[in-house]
Structure formats: C-alpha cells, structure tokens
Image (spheres, rainbow, N blue to C red):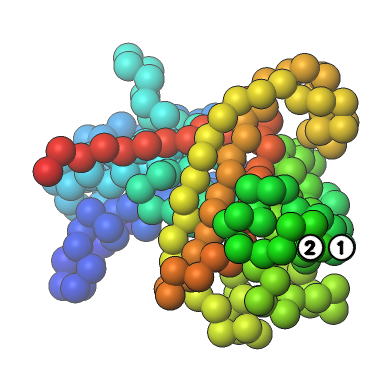
Amino acid sequence: MQLNPESDRPLHLQAEDMLRKMIQMDDYRNGKLLPNEVDLSRQMKISRNTLRQAINKLVFEGILTRKKGYGTMVSSQNVMSNARNWMSFSQEMKAMGIPVQNFELHVSYRQAPEEAEKFFGSKQGQHLFCLERLRGKPGLPFVYFISFFNPKIPMNVEDDMTLPLYSILSDKYGIVVKTSKEMISAEAADARLAEKLGIDTGAPILVRKRFVLDTNDMPVEYNIGYYRADNFTYSIEFVNE
C-alpha cells in the first residue's frame, strides 16, 4: 500500500492507481466497505487531502459511492459515461474494470437512416457497411449498438469485428478517430429491443447517437446505442471559464 514519493507520477495519481487495484478484490466488489480515510492515508503514507483527491476521482467516475455515516464502497456495476472525455464502449468498460461480453454480432450492407446519409454525404438509398452488436458485462447484455460507416472507408465482412472497432480503423485503414458529437434521448423499448436487452416492452431505455469524425474532421461512424436505463449513467461536467 506504500507509494513512491520519488516517482515523477503525482501521489494522488499513485493513490488512484492503488485504489483501482484494491477495489478489484472480490471482498470489495461484493460490498465490503473500504477502510476509512484515516487508516487508508496512514497505510499509503500520504495526507488525507491527497487520498481524498484520488477517492473523489473514482466517485466522479461512478466507481465508488460515499454514504454519509456509513462509508465508501464500490458502486454497483452501473456503467457511467463521461461527456468531458469521450471513449469507446470498450475503453469505458476497461476504465471501470468491467470485462466486456459480446452476445450478438452481425455485419451486413443495408440502407442507412437519412440522418446518417446526410452526415456522410452519401447517395440516398445507398447500402452502407453496418455493424450490429449486443454487448454488456458477463451475463448481462445492456446495450445494443448499430453502426454505419462512411462508404469511403473500404470496410467489409472479412474484417474481424471481434477486435476493438477503433483499433481496426487505425491499424488497417489508417483512420484515427478524434471527435464524437453526441445526442442523448429517452424512449420506450419496442418488442425487439426489449427481447435483446432482457426488459419489458415499453420499459425506458436511453438512446445515444454518436457522430464520429477523424483527425481531419472526416465523418467516420454514425452510431446508435440503445441502453438499459437501469445500467447506464451519462455524466456531464461543466466548467465556468
């Protein structure tokens, strides 16, 4: 539990790393309270303010939960996305220490929504490469993704879509994504989505649209994610300049 004061890495980041490792232990994932701040700071040989800075970061990410008069514990595995620094689904899950499971994966060429055609500037009615994935954590699918891709990118059904999507784009096609413009809305699950997500028809779901561009501002991906509302939280941070 001791940190390295001689390291170039700030102590609060070292403490954050240590906490991330610690809370992967089964006892803490199963609801055991973290040691109190006095004991933890003594074990790490850092000030309580430094420790609190690390804990606050994990609370903000939704990984830890503070309960007044009770203590700090690992949050239930509710996926939190932060609007300040966008990440792919795999990156979001990895940041929270949650393994990803793919329950369904389909590739096809099909007509994209008009909104996607306008984003890509493609011909109306043109069939675009489409990737559909039902994803979640082990034993619990909680998001259904549908992605369409710019027809200028020669993606095809031979690509191994079990690999991280943005790694494929980077490694095979030399495309590095940079910007994600997002829209969040709520709707009721239709019968098809309800069956995939394991919820009742009409249950609330969150709909997350992503318009992804590369480093040259070329449209790359139009993505719609349908999330179980009880397993996804969208976090937004505003800063006054």
Q: Is 214 drawn above or below residue 11 in the view shown?
A: below
Name the image quarter holding the N terminus.
Answer: bottom left
The front one of 191 and 232 is 191
Residue to which mark 1 is pinned: 108
Q: Residue at x 58, y 57 (%)?
A: 119
Q: Residue at x 54, y 65 (%)?
A: 219
Q: Position of residue 20 (x, y in %)?
A: 43, 51
Q: Amino acid at mark 1?
A: Ser
Disc nearer the start of the sequence (2/1): 1
What's the mark number on residue 240? none
Q: State the SS at label 1.
A: strand
Residue to which mark 2 is pinned: 126
Q: State the SS at label 2.
A: loop
Q: Is residue 39 visible?
A: no
The front one of 24 and 40 is 24
Mark 1 nearby-residue class (10 Å; few <14, some 14–19, many ≥20): some
Q: Residue at x 62, y 76 (%)?
A: 169
How far apart are labels 2 and 1 at the CA level?
Answer: 13 Å
Q: Position of residue 200 (x, y in %)?
A: 82, 19
Q: Position of residue 194 (x, y in %)?
A: 82, 28
Mark 2 or 1: the one toward you: 2
Q: Amino acid at mark 2?
A: Gln
